[in-house]
Amino acid sequence: MTILDYLIVIGYLAAMLVVGVLHLSRASESVRSYFLGGHRIPWWITAMSSSMSSIDITGTMINVSILYFMGVRSFYYNIWMIGGVALMCHLGRWIRRSNLVTAAEWMSFRFGEGWAGELPRLTIAIISIGSLIGYIAYAYVGVGKFVSAFVPPLSADPARNAQLWGVLVIGFTALYAMLGGLFSVAYTDLIQTFILFLTSLYISVTAFLTVSGDFITANTPAGWETLHPTARIDYLADVALEGYPAGAFEVFWPWVFMWGFQALLSFFSGPGMGPGTQFMLSTASARDTCKQGAGYELLTFPKWTLVAGLALLALATPEIKIQDTDMVLPQIINTILPMGIKGFVLVGFLAAFMSTFSISINNGTSYVIQDIYIRHLRPQAGGREFLTVTYISSVVFVVLGVLAGLSMHGLFELGIWVFVILGGSMIVPLIFRWYWWRFNGWGFAFGMIAAFAVALAQKVLQNKFGSTLPDYYFYFLMLAVSLAVSVLVTLLTPATDPRTLQEFYRRTQPWGFWQPVHQAVEGGWPEFRKERMLRLDLFNCAVGATCLFSLNMLPVFFMLHNWPMFRALLLVFALTAGIMYRSWYKNLPTD
């Protein structure tokens, strides 16, 4: 990099640190101010921040490399993200009506006090902390590999050099995230969103003008350009993505089935304990939460534009020699981009990383403060005290995450484990909590613990014993174990207190199997009027998912110069967007 590139990056980092310092006093007013912005942050800003939290360096490195090697069908890997449409349709308004601070606190709201409510609350807090450490390890490996490709080496050993730079970048990001809480996260994300938009625009325009449709057809295997599902992808027989043996993805249908099944389940589960819940709880109303969910989904659009543009530029650059499949992205930037632009694009990727990492730290520490420290140790803790504990816990999380990351290497393998396997370990209890009145806190806690144990066992078998059993076997085994344990434990333990269920149902108004509770609420609150939204919500989820997927695929086929597919997707997007305006926007809640 040149002096100009370094100055651009240093200037950006300094500006982000200043924002954190400026919001320090506002964040220290109370727990709600630190973790939820005091419900004063506009929904469109939290939508930007939420969308930025789904875009990071490590994820972009993974998506660029698998698109480069797998082709357009690699987008099925991310199909689970369309499950977020449910947040704008029904789950967002249900979550916001609790008026709580954390997802773990929500457990007491749903399952009551006593151990039947306390055990799931502690379980989700502890598992969220474990998941945060896993995410830090994932982010640490990716950002270290990325940054070390552009800066002077700190060690002659490439692996050690990536580790050292990963520590520096993660340490700096944790510092600015700790200073201002959700205020600094949200308002820096506002800046970072515009940076990412400009970066995406530059890369996509460059790719479109550089790579022609004929070039793509001539330089990729047959079928690389198509999105059509297939049982096998023959040209992947010799491809060995980092962390997987050659040919692991040649038989493609089980992977698509796993990713698609995760997407389907996520329509009904909602977020578990990640930043998504925190953003929804931070809005001023249930109506704003629904709009925030829509904004989040729409603002992920630049991510796929960026991924497609970078992969096409890699195809058109013969100087790029792929030794490590995780290094496709850094090689593209180093080889293609001119002086000044390189620094700006680096800032765009650092912005994406810092956004995702900072909100994850903020979210993880909220469980330590709200669900462990204040709940069990120091209920009278004041602003300065909880800030001190927040800072200490953030440092501990970073250290543990870095230590875990030292034993991990392949980003794609790690990404599937963190987001599909580890994320999927929560999904069965998360579904039951909304739709089955008999489901209790014991079933929730033990169902989640059992699934989490299977997820950890998979990683131990892979790292310690060299297991080559495909991930999808563990995924469906984990779901089966979680389902069996959740139902069995629920039926063997007492039901949740009726008063707790009635208050939950009256405020949240979920649909599902709630008939006994519904009758009790109607008897106790004659003025109660239940929302009749089941069919409309399901309809909006289906149409919204189609709308979102077509929107995200539009720039991909535009850059591929595939005009018939582009026109078809444009028509689908226009029709579904019009339907959503009438069926979703016109029926937003008033509370």
Image: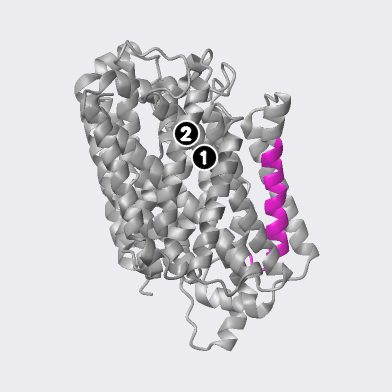
* Dot 1 amino acid type: Gly
Query: Relative to 84, does residue 102 appear above or below in the rendering?
Result: below
Quadrant in the picture for residue 375: bottom right
Disc 1, SS: helix
Q: Which residues are magenta?
A: 436-457
Q: Residues within 10 Å of mark 2 (few under 14, many from 20)?
A: many
Q: Report which residue position mark 1 lands on.
A: 260
Can residue 539 be seen here? The reply is no
Distance of label 2 from label 1 (alpha carbons): 33 Å
The image quadrant that residue 9 belongs to is top left
Q: Main secondary structure of the magenta part?
A: helix
Q: Is residue 163 left or right of residue 10?
A: right
As drawn, the label of residue 153 is none
Residue that badge 2 annotates: 166
Residue at 40% in and 29% down:
147
Residue 480 in the image: x percent, y percent? 70, 45
492 sits left or right of 284 in the view: right
Judged from the image, the secondary structure of the residue bearing numbered disc 2 is helix
Q: Amino acid at mark 2?
A: Gly
In this view, the mark in front (2 or 1): 2
